Image (cartoon, helix red, strand yellow):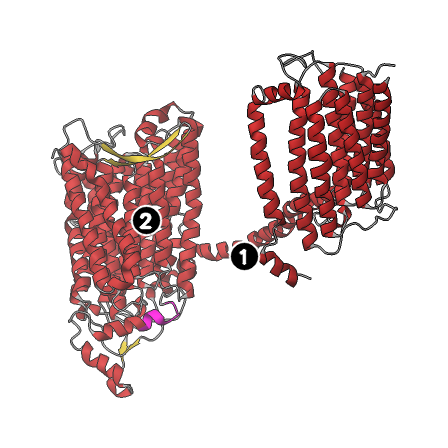
Amino acid sequence: MVTLVLFIAFAIIALVGALGVVISRNPVHSALWLVATLLSMAGFFILEGAYLVSAVQVIVYASAIVVLFLFVIMLLGVDREESLSDPLKVQRPVALMLGLVVFALLIGLMGNHWATGGESATAALNSGGGGNVERVAREIFTTYLWPFELTSALLVVAVVGGVALARRSRRAEAASEVAP
Amino acid sequence: MIITPTWYLVLAAALFAIGAVGMLVRRNVIVMFMCVELMLNAVNLTFVTFSKTLNDLSGQVAVFFVLVVAAAEVAIGLALIVAIFRRRHTGTTADDISELRG
Amino acid sequence: MNKSSMLDYIWLVPALPLFGAALLLTFGKRIGEPIAGWIATALMFGSFVVSVFMFGALRGLPSGEHAHTVKLFDWFASGGFKVSMGFLADPLSVTWILFVTGIATLIHLYSIGYMHGDARFSRFFAYLNLFVASMLILVLGSNFLVTFLGWEGVGLCSYLLISFWFERNSAAVAGKKAFVTTRVGDLGFMIAMFLIFGSLGTLDYAVVGEKIGGLASGTITAIALLLFLGAVGKSAQIPLHFWLPDAMEGPTPVSALIHAATMVTAGIFIVARAHPIFEASQAAQDVVMWVGAITALLAATVALVQTDIKRVLAYSTVSQLGYMFLALGVGAYTAAIGLVVAHAFFKAALFLGSGSVIHGLDENQDIRTMGRLRKYMPLTGFGFIVAWLAIAGLPPFAGFWAKDEVLAKAFFHGDYAVWFIGVVAAILTAFYMTRETFLVWFGNERFAVVSSETEIDGEAAHAESHSETHADSSSDSHAESHEAGMISTESPTVAYGTAPAPARMTHPPHEAPATMTIPVLILAALAAIGGILILPFKGFEYLGHFLEPVFETVEPIEVPSFAAGFGLSTLAVVVAITGVLIGRGMYRKGLEDPADDPLDRRLGSLGRVFGNAYYFDAVLARCVDGPIRRFAEWIANTVDQGIIDGAVNGVASGVASISNGVRRAQGGVVRQYALVVFAGVAALLIFALVRS
């Protein structure tokens, strides 16, 4: 019963937060609504027993990434409000229609096992000892060791790329002064 | 009333659709990015749900990888936005960046 | 070193002049005159010496062997098509390289004197070397493609050399004419090669000779005729003959080289080399024979009334080449080659002699204003006169034996009509050569030496003083007159029908320097005694015996009896003497009035037809300028611009309008793209739902 109440509460927060992200005219508000959704997402993970994932969700998503978003918004000063009318006339109705269609299709697909396959192909949820954190860790460092190491490479690339892109080079500065 | 996985999946589908529509209708590049995060989170929720349903830890591990990719994507994407906006002082929306028009 | 491996060095024969050409083209300017000329001559002579060794090596081959193929490297291989860069040393090619290198050496030597003072002295020798090298590659090639390489090289060099003095418009035009005309023949050669490869799968002479009999007779005839088209172009036979007289625009040594050693004999060579193909097709042989006979006669008539010392010789060459093709057509290959060799000797002597005359007369080429030059240029005159006797067909000179052999073979082959044409052409040959010789060397002097009082500037007087020692080698006046001639943009060539310009010279005619007289005399000596090679007596047919292995499959033409052969020879002598005597009777005293040629008077309107070469050039020019130009313009305007360009432009504008439509999809707006991507997601989901 408690879980049901919690689920409904989280679900409402998540949906409202998502709608808030989309509807808010001010990007700062959008970012705040996004935090709400992300936190309720962490709640769902706890409800489903994925404690480690939940913690990471809060630490990485709800704090780090959102803070990064807010930084950029403030840095660039793009927190101006968007006009409500869309210059692309067909964009909004078609997008809405497509969104409903995709939603309906996803619901429709839920009923079959086309995409899921059989049960427990690698490791059962409660196999081995220890808690959720330990089991997930064991999975990552045994079965998924190679992909995990590759993600480190991905992160390094992202860091270097981010620095290279955002750095204000002296030449580009000179060019931007001449250009306008 | 028992919460079945179907509830989670319907919720995830709804979040995904909202994120997608937001991505299409908003013009502020940063908000579009947030919508992408919404969609990714919907997928994460699906992963965890199936992990429980199918009794397989791999779903939770996959969420980790999604998180890493999302972090990298945000870092690069925001750096791109910064670089673009630094050069162009005029436009601030995705529609303004349309030099590649055919 | 054994003999067989010595033949492996045959590549040196073309390599030496090729090296010379490369050297002189690169460093020619720095080497300068006269070293460049001596280098070129020395390399040419080296090539001749190697050729002599090759001759010895070939003679030394064990009996039963008579050819040696040297494969240098694989030229290219593409699928089943393999061509090796190979040289074939057999009696035929060795005969050719011997006289080509020998005569070319003499011409090189002569050119050192002739080109003295020319601004592009080194380049001239580079081209000469390249020309000869191309000819040697042509001759030595072991397959059609290597021969074609040389064939095209010869064509290129002829263009470069004929238009060597390109400041003159007429020279530039003549070079283009020669190039384009021979190109028509080259096309035939190429198609023939395609046909040979297409039907036999190889281009090797040896293999083609073996396999050709297995083809359908129509294919053989087509190949033979197309090859012959190539030969017609290169050897200036009717109807592609008209480039050769115009080629006189080139420096005279070039004319000598083209006419005697290289270029024009290439056509004879290819027919002789490809004789199995021609032997397999009677129709093709008949065509060769008749084209040769008609060319021999018509060119001889044109030569009758020409007034330019070199144009007479040019038409004479066309006529003599006609004889050679006539002989090839009746299957008398050895006789044809005998005439090639003899002709090379006397025609080179005649050309070099006339070059000396032109040189000594301040670029005057009009035989109507010459006369009694014997007195001024005794050595050159002697050589020229010996060569005249040879070409006129008087025994015992080489020309007699060669021509007699050709006519006898035609007669005993049963081609009496052709034989008769040959005899008529022989009278004409004797006559026009007599006419030229008497007008140039005998009779009255028809040029005036301007007395020194009328001269104002001291430079001319200086030339005058020098010319008194005219027998000395290369005086200064020489160079001056030559340079003056080179800078002038007017062609010295005298076309038929132009009035003789009064020849006024600042100094009397002078003998050429030793570098020019010695080659003439050597060639004249060869023209006199060269007949030894081809005496039609048992045990003396050196050339015939030497060439026998090449043509062993060809049925020899037997002389039925000694009496018959002797009778024909007697007839040939009578014919030659008749021609000479008529000419002597008409021109013994020279001309009373340079503008009044007794022959022209007698021939009347026929003479004008002859003189204008049957109006072939005029008609051709009219055609090219009239209907052909209109056709070309129609092609250019309607077909090319309308249809071809229209198609191209249509495709372009079609693509443009399509892309204009497609362009809208590329709006540059990211959200539109995202919309499309999202629609794609929806489509994929539909697919998944339907599939499950």
Which residue is depicted at the point 65% across and 33% down?
B69
Q: Position of residue B50 (x, y in %)?
A: 73, 18
Q: Position of residue A155 (x, y in %)?
A: 59, 36
- CB within 8 Å, label 2 to label 1: no
Identify the residue shown where x is 32% and y is 67%: C366
Q: Nearer the viewer, residue A105 or B63?
A: B63
Where does label 1 land, which residue? C625
Depth check, mark 2 against mark 1: the one in front is: 2
Q: As displayed, is residue A72 above or below residue C80?
A: below
Tell me which amino acid carries mark 1: Asp
Quarter of the figure with the C terminus of chain A: bottom right
- Give the extent of the magenta segment: C484-491
Could you tell me which secondary element the residue under label 2 belongs to? loop
Q: Position of residue B45 (x, y in %)?
A: 75, 25
Judge left or right: residue A165 versus residue A80: left
Residue located beneath label 2 in the image:
C263
For the residue carrying disc 2, how many other residues have a C-alpha within 10 Å: few (<14), some (14-19), or many (20+)? Answer: many
Q: Position of residue A70 (x, y in %)?
A: 74, 45
Above/below status of A171 relative to C98: below
Q: Is residue C354 left or right of residue C487?
A: left
Three-letter code for the amino acid on which mark 2 is drawn:
Met
Q: Quadrant of residue C3?
A: top left
Looking at the rendered structure, the secondary structure element under dot 1 is: helix
Quadrant for the N terminus of chain A, please.
top right
Q: Please indicate, yes or no, whether residue C625 appears anywhere in the rendered image.
A: yes
